[in-house]
Amino acid sequence: MKAALFNKLWLIFFVLMQTKTYAQSQGVDFIKAKDWKEVIQKAKSENKMILVDCYTTWCHPCRLMTSEVFSKPEVGDYINTHFIAVKIQMDSTKNDSEAVRTWYADAREMIHLYQIRSYPTFLFFDPNGELVHRSVGAVAVPEFLRIAKNALEPSQQYYTLLHKLKKQGVTQGDYVSAFHAARDAYEMDRADSLFRIFWQRSTPVERNSLQELTYSIPFIDTTADPVFPYLWDYVMSENSKDQSAYLNIERKVKSLITNEIIGLYKQSSGSSSVDRVDRLIEKKYQKYSFELLAKARIDYYLSQRQFLAFVHDVERHHSNLRSGIDSNELLGYAYQVFYHCGDSSSLSTAMSWLDTVPAHLDISALVVRGLLNYRLGNRQEALHFMNLAIQKSPIRDQEDLKQMLVRIEKGEILWLPTDI
């Protein structure tokens, strides 16, 4: 239930970011071919590259791409102009049509040959059927168009770049393109390896540049990483002319420090040891110590299942601007109280947090408010808020909420029964 709700909230946020949905006929024109050989023949005759949408019947992100990305006219215009597009179902069910069954052999071969492990996977081939580019996972329209445009450029094609890196005359720009392409392909270990080579080849001046520090953000997981001091020095200098880029680096630094604090808390024993950690962090990271210690304590108490302390600290810090707790985090904290805390005081406190959530998160706030009321025993109030959430949600998102509504009407337990 916990995972289902967060998937639901994520879906709502994703859909709200999109523009009005158009009919599928205005989007990507996926051809109906009987096999892979026919696709290649068509690509050769039209001198077009091939886009293969590898999907499964159980994959929700795959359906999201179909309804929210491939249906858009701007996506259809670009893909239909430059590619032969085909959908291939990678799993099999007893309800598959004959058209799907004719692709079984090709689908199995592609899974093995191209090591397809996650869905959706998008494969880009040249007109001769040679794989040149790859992307994994659902993305919004602008990101998918970026990926498709990269697939047309040899200097950005993932597999073309990997071949080039084995030769002489490789530039730093080649490594940048390669580790970005590796991330799009969800080959994270290779992406990290490519970034590390790139970083080692950089000069000290280049390493302190905003551009290279921005490149490093996805690859740094700990304050012990040798790149972290460069990030820290940059945010401490506060002299960036690019405020957006500065905030991205600052956000990463805060996240890494928070993880360090939580790790130290877990190694400590007793309140005195935790206090010593706080003093260490205050001295080491003075600029951010108040905000990060507040969030780290909250996350620590949650991870240790100390829920009363968790509620107390969220209540103590959420209204203080210096704590940096945003509305999305507050919604998540309120849901955690619903899921783990059965005492009326904690539930009522979490309910009060929702009063500060802005209007653009209203649907999610209504869902969480309904759940909190339900656990408090106010079933009619819970049904009221869930109905409001359904009324305000796009039609395509209402079914999951209606199922939750039915479970509330039946009095089913939607929380973890073993907690307080």
Image (cartoon, rainbow, N blue to C red):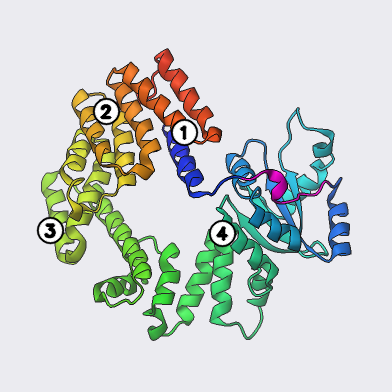
Which of the two marks, 3 or 4, is nearer to us in this view? Answer: 4
The answer to whether the residue labelled 3 contacts the one labelled 1, judged by CB atoms less than 8 Å apart, is: no
List the residue tagged with mark 1.
4
Q: Quadrant of the C terminus?
A: top left
Q: Quadrant of the N terminus?
A: top left
Q: What is the three-letter code of the residue carrying label 4?
A: Glu
Residue 89 falls within the magenta-colored stretch: no
Q: Which residue is depicted at the point 65% across and 47% down? A: 71
Give, as a single range, the part of the protein colored magenta.
Answer: 22-32
List the residue tagged with mark 2.
341
Could you say whether the residue bearing mark 4 is in a helix, strand or loop? helix
Query: Real-space Cα distance between discs 2 and 4?
Result: 39 Å
Q: Earlier in the sequence, mark 3 or mark 4?
A: 4
Pointer 4: residues within 10 angstroms few (<14), some, or many (20+)?
few
Q: Is residue 58 left or right of residue 281?
A: right
Q: Which of marks 2 and 1 is nearer the N terminus?
A: 1
Query: Real-space Cα distance between discs 2 and 3?
Result: 31 Å
The answer to whether the residue labelled 2 contacts the one labelled 1, judged by CB atoms less than 8 Å apart, is: no
List the residue tagged with mark 4.
143
Q: What is the three-letter code of the residue carrying label 2?
A: Cys
Farthest top residue in view: 410
List the residue tagged with mark 3.
279
Q: Where is residue 66 in the image (x, y as percent from the top left)?
A: 65, 45
Query: Real-space Cα distance between discs 2 and 1?
Result: 19 Å
**Most foreground residue, 168 or 391:** 391
